[in-house]
Image: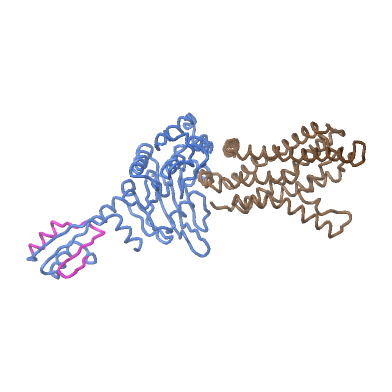
Amino acid sequence: MKDLLKFESRKLFHAKILYICIIIVIAVLLLFMGVQKLTDVLMEEISGAESDIFLIGTGNSGLSWMLSSLTPYVIMVFGVFTAIYVCGDFGNGTIKNIFSRGYSRTEVYFSKYFISLFVLLGFGLISMLIGFLGGTLMWRIGGGWSFKVILLMLIQLVGIAAYNALFCFFAALLKKMATTMILAIATPFAFSLILSLIDLLVDLRRVNVSDFWISGCISSASSVGASSGDMIRGLVVALVYIAIFTVCGWLLARKREV
Amino acid sequence: MQTILETRGLTKKYGNKAVVNNISMHIDRGEVYGFIGRNGAGKTTFMRLVLGLALPDAGEISLFGGESRKSAGQKIGSIVEAPALYTNCSAYENLKRFSTLINYNRRGAQKREINEDQMIHELIDIVGLTDAAKKKAGHYSLGMKQRLGLAIAMLGEPEFLVLDEPVNGLDPAGIKEIRDAINNLKQAKGVTFLISSHLLDELSKIVTKYGIINDGYLVEEVRASDLDRMSSRSVTVVVDDPAKAVEIISGLVPREDISVVEHAVNISCHNVPVPSAELNRRLVSAGVSVSALHNKSVSVEDYFIERMGR
């Protein structure tokens, strides 16, 4: 496993896709913040500096952007990276050189899984950092800093780990880079949309189905005002998804032929 | 002699069709085993099973006398189907990357002292890619890719090389280089090979044992030395009295190897060499007039085509 991780790490740092994804994540966040800032400025011009409408925009800060930086668009980039990275060796046949050297399918699956996890967590931290820096520069640093912020960030990182498990499961299921990428892009959007629709159509009063999808886990920890109940729910749901998708992906990978 | 590969009843099915059917094979250390069969006969699937790329439906594979796949895999190099390369990387980077998969500690203490970079440059030299070592593999010709694939297979000084069509796409000079490299590895380091190729004449220059596969079955295994003896002789004698000639020739070769077409008596013998001089002497002594005697050499290729059912 150690040799495989070394192999994957060397491959990772030579992969252009890593740097392209980092640039895209930063660009997407800066674009969102830029649009928000522009909206604020326009609102200010239209309605005057002391109006109520302007005050709505003042919710923006380094802290708020840091905690809400994991937008679906950013998650989409994560999915693209994992699809390309995990399926790459299968697509160009280089996986043959790995299996034939005596490495088991379990070792290969988990080496890719862990490297992908490492990268996605890195992407997540970069997103948060950019959110914080951009938000602070464009608005203000924001109040409400406490140990809770660290907990919220950790829950979001666990949410990212759940997405990683999902994307790796897709890679093990579909084996092809293009189809894995499509599914990795579509699923976070589609599930959020479908579950939100269910919430709208079926009034369960005390429960929102969408809170039990991975995006719900992350959004439950995207505000300093999150209740401890929401935080615990987000954490537990994310951990359950990690367990389910990791085990399913591993079971599929174990029987994989190349 | 240590057994490098032993399979017992190895079977692989795709759907209802057995692509590899109950194959039991045995390869000893130092052998160069030539695997021959038509396209789709099951050669590549068999190799994929041996390398752990495909999973068998039945049967067993034993490598290096029963070592675990993890340990055995470290001693095996391979090219199966097309060479597997990172096309956006140079030859050096490809080799450097795959060399991280070699666990020298698992191979024994003496391997630890090998300088990895030195080994990579040596391999690049051996396969003749010195001038193109920094060029991206995606820009290589098919032959160059094949050579790089061979260099990757040779990483870590493997004791067993599994090569599926290793000279595909190579020019005559390249084919000779690969053949020489195989001979060198065999003689200097005692490397064992399992090689498939359609270039039977090329194969016949290096192989010590042949395995003929047809429709998933291992039809026959034959030593190269036996094959040389068996496949080389066929004699046609044109005589005035074919019946009498057949009677005399039957004393020298089995009757089933003799056939008659008008005045021509054909002796196609796979089991014993035909002593043509002795044959002529006996016929003449018995009063049979011999107007012509042709020694024909049956090529390795003809022998295999016959065995493969074509």
Q: Colour of chain A?
A: brown
| Side of A81 relative to B210 (left or right) | right
Residue A82 visible (yes or no): yes
Q: Position of residue A45 (x, y in %)?
A: 86, 38
Question: In which quadrant of the rendered image does the N terminus of chain A lie?
Answer: top right
| Side of A115 relative to B257 (left or right) | right
Q: Between residues B5 and A9, which one lies in front from this camera angle? A: A9
Instruction: State whether residue B45 is above or below residue B134.
Output: below
Q: Residue at x 17, y 66 (%)?
A: B265
Question: Which quarter of the figure has residue B143?
Answer: top left
Q: Which chain is depicted blue?
A: B
Q: Position of residue B174 (x, y in %)?
A: 36, 42
Q: Residue at x 48, y 47 (%)?
A: B66
Q: Is residue B281 magenta?
A: yes
Q: Between residues B213 and A11, which one lies in front from this camera angle? A: A11
Q: Position of residue B272 (x, y in %)?
A: 23, 57
**Which stretch appears magenta?**
B258-285
Q: Residue at x 48, y 29 (%)?
A: B115
| Side of B259 relative to A120 (left or right) | left
Number of numbered markers: 0
Question: Which quarter of the figure has residue B39?
Answer: bottom left
Question: Which quarter of the figure has residue A58?
Answer: top right
